[in-house]
Image (tube, rainbow, N blue to C red):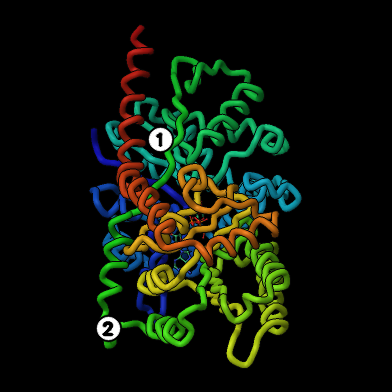
Amino acid sequence: MGKTIIISNRLPVQLQIDNDEITAIPSVGGLATGMKSVHSGSDSLWIGWSGLTEEEIPKELDPKIDKALKDNGCSKVSLTSEEIDGFYYGFSNRTIWPLFHYFLEYAEFETDSWNTYKAVNQKFANAILEKADDDDVIWVHDYQLMLVPEMVKEKRPNTSIGFFLHIPFPSYEIFRTLPWRKEILRGLLGSDLIGFHTYDYERHFLSSVRRLLGLEVSFNEIHLEERVIKVDSFPMGIDYKKFSDAASKHEKNTADKQSELQRRLNIHKESTPDAKLILSIDRLDYSKGIAKRLNAFEYFLNKHPEYKEKVRLIILAVPSRSNVPQYQLLKKEIDELVGRINGEFATVSWTPIWYFYRSMPFENLIDLYTSSDIALLTPIRDGMNLVAKEYIATRTDKTGVLILSEMAGSANEMNESLLINPNNFDQISDALIQAIHMPKEEQIARNSILQKRLERYNVEKWANDFMKSLLEQRETTQKFISK
Ligand code: ADP
Ligand code: G6P
């Protein structure tokens, strides 16, 4: 086997140019944070978009940009602002993202952005073809690049290609509304192995393949001409050790080593030892249910006024896809909701919601995870939700309660958390009360099981399982051809 080529739209670092100086900042999102750990432990090459459009990179800085990426094991695909508009803000995030997260009413079906999506996928495929040798293994990631496998397979039939979808694959009834549904399926079927986070997403995909393409599907294998394509579920894990080590180190921080945030959180704890901190962390995305969560919190405070001044909700939302109108509207809605709820309930000594709209350095994420008594994660739909896993991994003394939406892929593996339906405010309110009063022994018992599972099925195991299955698939296909 040759080298591994990872390919995704978002690279693990985003480049910024400031006075001709180039800085690489870590990317946010499950794909980048998860794969980063896999990538740094191997000699793989990661191909993707740098975060800057062609117009934003002065010609003379191009070599510096390439060098900054090379230092991070990456190589760029250059995209113009027009391509980014049609491919990223357009087809990827105004068509596929809402559709695959069951927000059918947000999905736009525009031929122009579909055409740009195709052209940009071809650019990514060309970048692979330029760098890949026949014995390399190619691992394509996520919904922005669903046509790439077929484009590469056509030119390099002997190369092993794996594809992993980091978001849900919707049910056939939703998927079939897409005008280019067959092209998307054929694009994916260029792969030898197609992976999903859960068995349900896998089942939905197989059902679409059967019903829309009429292909023979036996168990989890698809027969296409002389090829056999395997479909399987691989729930993505986290870099468990990175989070648990950071949390242990964090606890030992002396006063002079503490971040401003850690100091403030400690002051809060000392001054109000009985008050509970409830944390939520997400990209600012409608699929994450942030607005509903705020409404549910308001409902809880109205229904149980005895908890006023006894709880505080921290909302950390990282800016995301802010050129897409639905995200701008959501930002406005959340700003207004936070303002209204704080205005309605705040007292001289208590603000019910602390709201941060920004990306935070890793240390600050750890500050928040380790200081919070409860994590409240209520996505309406979520492919996986790694934040839930990260919260549990940082609980070094095993206390803390996770309240998690059953609509998140991670809920399948986290039965010991308090699972809720994000649309059921009574259930969320009851879960908050159960969490506030949960005895320490019960918290420890639940989290011990969760931690063991997360430690075993970490991101390294996830990547190894996927790779092993891909290589086995290569052998199966070769046997099938030689029959
Ligand atoms: P998604 O991939 O949809 O964004 P996940 O929960 O799977 O959702 O992954 C989010 C990742 O982004 C996590 O690894 C989390 O640590 C990171 N992250 C989320 N919010 C922030 C933030 N404000 N600053 C830095 N990293 C963040
Ligand atoms: C999700 C998607 C990723 C994406 C990430 C951040 O995790 O599955 O593909 O990279 O969100 O979104 P962005 O649009 O900023 O890349």
Q: In this view, does 256 lie to the left or right of 423?
A: left
Tell me if mark 1 has few (under 14), some (14-19) or many (20+) residues whose alpha carbon lies within 10 angstroms of its own: many
Cα–Cα gap, marks 1 and 2: 44 Å
Q: Which of marks 1 and 2 is in front?
A: 2
Q: In front here: 237 or 441?
A: 441
Observer-nearest of 39 and 84: 39
Amino acid type, callout 2: Lys
Q: Residues within 10 Å of mark 2 (few under 14, many from 20)?
A: few
Q: Is residue 218 above or below residue 24?
A: above
Residue 337, horizontal then vertical, whole percent: 70, 74
| Callout 1 secondary element | strand
Q: Can residue 77 be seen in this view?
A: no
Tell me, for residue 162, which label it has, or none: 1
Q: Is residue 423 left or right of residue 6?
A: right
Picture coordinates of residue 82, whole percent (x, y)? 60, 59
Image quadrant where one finds the C terminus: top left
Which residue is found at the position 53% from the left and 62% from the top? 435
Relative to the observer, which residue lies in front, 15 or 461?
461
